[in-house]
Image (cartoon, helix red, strand yellow):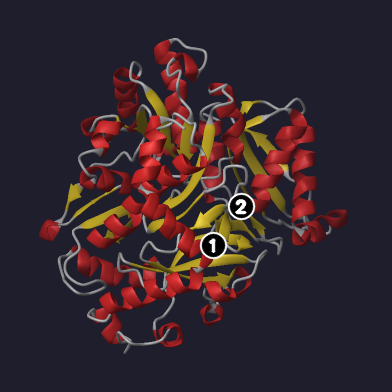
Amino acid sequence: MSVTNSIISAFYSKRLRAIDRFRRQPWDVQFEQFRLLVSYGAGTEYFRRYGFGEFGSVEEFQQRIPVVGYDELQHEIERVRAGEENILWPGKVRWFAKSSGTTGDRSKYIPITRESLEQCHFRGGRDVMAVFAYQNPDSKAFDGKALTLGGSHRLDTMGAGAQSGDLSAILIRNAPRWVGMVREPSMEIALIPDFEQKVEAICRRCSRQRITSFAGVPSWNLVLMNRMLEYAGADNLLEVWPDLSLFIHGGVSFAPYREQYKRLIPSSRMKYMETYNASEGFFALQDNLSTPDMLLMLDYGIFYEFLPLKDLHEPARAVTLADVEMGVNYAMIISTNGGLWRYMIGDTVEFTSLSPYKIRITGRTKSYINAFGEEIIIDNAERAVAAASAATGARVRDYTAAPVFMEGRSKGGHEWFVEFETPPSDVMLFAEVLDKTLQEVNSDYAAKRFKNTTLMAPQLVVARQGAFYRWMQEREKLGGQNKVPRLANDRRYLDELLKINTL
């Protein structure tokens, strides 16, 4: 065991026992979180409005407090931003994570309380270290410095002394002093608002540092890593950072990027650890790197509910952890120590284990294609892209898909816009395997494709290099937690991309 890992494991031994407890007693821990949360909520205007008090039951909570999204809660959040107290959480909230999810035009402002910072976001970061060090005692991932590529927005001061910015910027501003000793780049560079300027500054500062791990969104880190190779004149990242051995990633699926990272970091020592961390909270982490699912973290000041995706418009069907089932696609509902009550975050998950509770992210409640009853979700798309890539030797950099609507007597279909890192050996075969795999993993799609009943074979458009980057740049969405929407039920994004592709 490395000396650093020994220290981490010893320091966090009590915390590791707490994690083991919620593996064994999940509902006990979740009920404790519920009781703690409602004790805070009882003094808020929001609870009084719905007649719910500190001693109400879970069942009464579900009956009285409505399931909401950001639109329904926006008025209350704006009041909190203006400095009003005791609206959603006791006291005044001074921090708001600015988030747009994928590439939506309108920003969301997620309240970040002192409790959510300490008990959720920071605890999640510490648990990543503790779990990884315990599971990988010989790794040297924490012997050097961690490179983090955060958001690209400054913290904008609002009225009443509140501040907003990317979650990463808020975490950097509030992190304990010791974090700055083990993390790169400096705070000044980390908070540079222009993504491209920040990448250049990181290259100048970090190319000669001893970086042993890095963290962030796979797509944006890939941009940084490729630029680092150019800057250093290196063929792979081990020539720049010989001891690099861990990438902590989240935000988007890692599947389309895995082979590209293996090429950039050709080392058997390299480990990849997924986390599920959003502006609204830190939810899960990969506690076993040999399986792709993640352990749901149950003592972060979050009470979970899950609504079967098929019942998305019937919130009364939401269930707690006690009643979830494996193999069901659920929309996740959270009540948090950030003052979000029965908030539908917009992500969908599937349970892969009930003892302990483990999940995998399957998509978004608003990111799908269902123009013809085919109900394609992101999980279906990721599997199909992976199969098509494997069959043709391709490496996909980015992609999106949208419907081709029926006109006159013509049948509908899907159009896929794909930018390749390595082109497929046969573009037509890529499209055929994509189509075949979608039929294998989605029976609704298969039924619509049967003998071209409703859907024709998918159309594949090969994007020019840099098309997605230019599109995100035009929308001022470079870096941070901004994501390319994989699927859309209309053609707005795709038509914009097709226009850029012709320039």
Q: Say if residue 101 shows up in the picture.
A: no
Residue visible at 85% across and 56% down? Answer: 450
Q: Say if residue 335 shows up in the picture.
A: yes
Residue visible at 62% across and 46% down? Answer: 291
Q: Label 1's element?
A: loop
Q: Nearer the viewer, residue 341 or 103?
A: 341
Calculate the distance from the C-alpha at mark 2 to the C-alpha at mark 1: 10 Å
Identify residue for label 1: 365
User: Which comes before the other along the chain, label 2 or label 1?
Assistant: 1
Considering every residue shown, the one lying at the far left of the view is 160
Q: Residues within 10 Å of mark 2 (few under 14, many from 20)?
A: many
The image's mark for residue 200 is none
Question: Is residue 239 depicted above or below 432 in this figure?
Answer: above
Q: Amino acid at mark 1?
A: Thr
Q: Position of residue 503 (x, y in %)?
A: 51, 29
Q: Position of residue 54 (x, y in %)?
A: 30, 84
The image's mark for residue 378 is 2
| Image-based side of 424 in relation to 230, left or right | right
Q: Label 2's element?
A: helix
Q: Residues within 10 Å of mark 1 (few under 14, many from 20)?
A: some
Tell me if label 2 and label 1 are in contact, CB under 8 Å.
no
Q: Position of residue 267 (x, y in %)?
A: 56, 23
Residue visible at 41% across and 19% down? Answer: 228
| Image-based side of 474 in relation to 440, left or right | left
Considering every residue shown, the one lying at the far top of the view is 233
**Residue 141, image quadrant:** top left
Q: Nearer the viewer, residue 18 or 226?
A: 18
Q: Amino acid at mark 2?
A: Ile
